[in-house]
Amino acid sequence: MEQRFTQIYDRLHNYFGMQNWWPADTVFEMMVGAILVQNTNWRNAEKALHHAKPFLTPEQLDEMPTEELALLIRSSGFYRVKAKRIKAFLKWFQRYDYSVEYIKTFNWEVLRQELLQINGIGRETADVILLYAFAKPIFVVDAYARRIFYRIGWSLPDSYDALRQQVEAELGDDLLVYQEFHALLVEHAKEFCQVKPRCEHCPLQDICEQRSK
């Protein structure tokens, strides 16, 4: 089988080095950040996390009124909606006694279905949480990954899960590879494969068709 995704991973890893993602001080902060970054950039989500930091335990946020939480995370945008989503996530998290280690013992497919039933948790957010919080090897299909793979010239399935499974069939089950690959694709999209691409010095330039439409 042609090692398309492995080749991209190797090239980006050789160029950018280890990324050691997700950027957060605690696992709980990582999960809250995954909700805050929806429909915004990481800078805005990070500001919201900074304001919420004195209260960043599940117990404190669970007790906090939704309106107060919304004001804390205002810089993330759609803050009232995101406050409700965080509260819905906490209700689910409480069922596991807020224990990340306990959750890790469960099958990833069961956890994914439960996460997808939480208001405001879509596939991308669920998979980010599974990958970085619960240590499940799963490929996160975000806009950056699609942009990079498309511009290289690959034919991609429209379905989120079809593309995810296509990548996973090649990558195997190495958790660190999945964590690093997602981070490397984000870094590459920020550095080179922007909305208006910067192709000069791109580590993928010689294998990329540079499709822009």
Image (cartoon, helix red, strand yellow):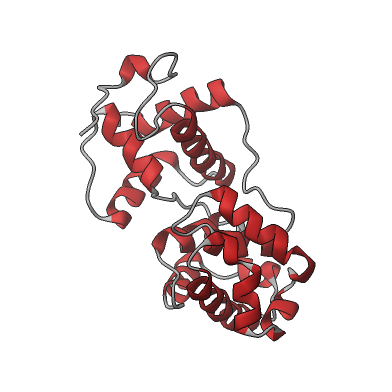
Q: Is residue 158 visible?
A: yes
Percent x, y for residue 9?
47, 31
Q: Residue at x 20, y 37 (%)?
A: 155
**Could you say where residue 156 lies in the image, as x and y percent from the top left?**
23, 42
Residue sitting nearer the eye, 10 or 195: 195
What residue lies at 62% left-to-right and 44% top-to-bottom?
Answer: 21
Is residue 11 toward the left or the right of residue 60 in the image?
left
Q: Tell me the residue at 56%/45% (across/down).
A: 179
**Is residue 134 visible to us here?**
no
Count all numbered tags in the image, as a single digit: 0
**Residue 58, percent from left and from top:** 70, 75
Taking the image as shown, residue 132 lies to the left or right of residue 145, namely right
Residue 115, given in percent of the width and then of the height, sits at 48, 72
Instruction: Please tell me in which quadrant of the rendered image residue 83 appears.
Output: bottom right
Q: Quarter holding the N terminus?
A: top left
Q: Quadrant of residue 72?
A: bottom right
From what the image shows, is residue 19 above or below residue 162?
Answer: above
**Residue that appears at 73% across and 58% down:** 26
Determine the residue located farthest toward the right in the rendered image: 54
**Vertical side of 205 occupied by 20: above or below:** below
**Image: 189 above or below 45:** above
Where, quadrant-wise, is the C terminus in this rendering? Answer: top left
Q: Nearer the viewer, residue 145 or 191?
A: 191
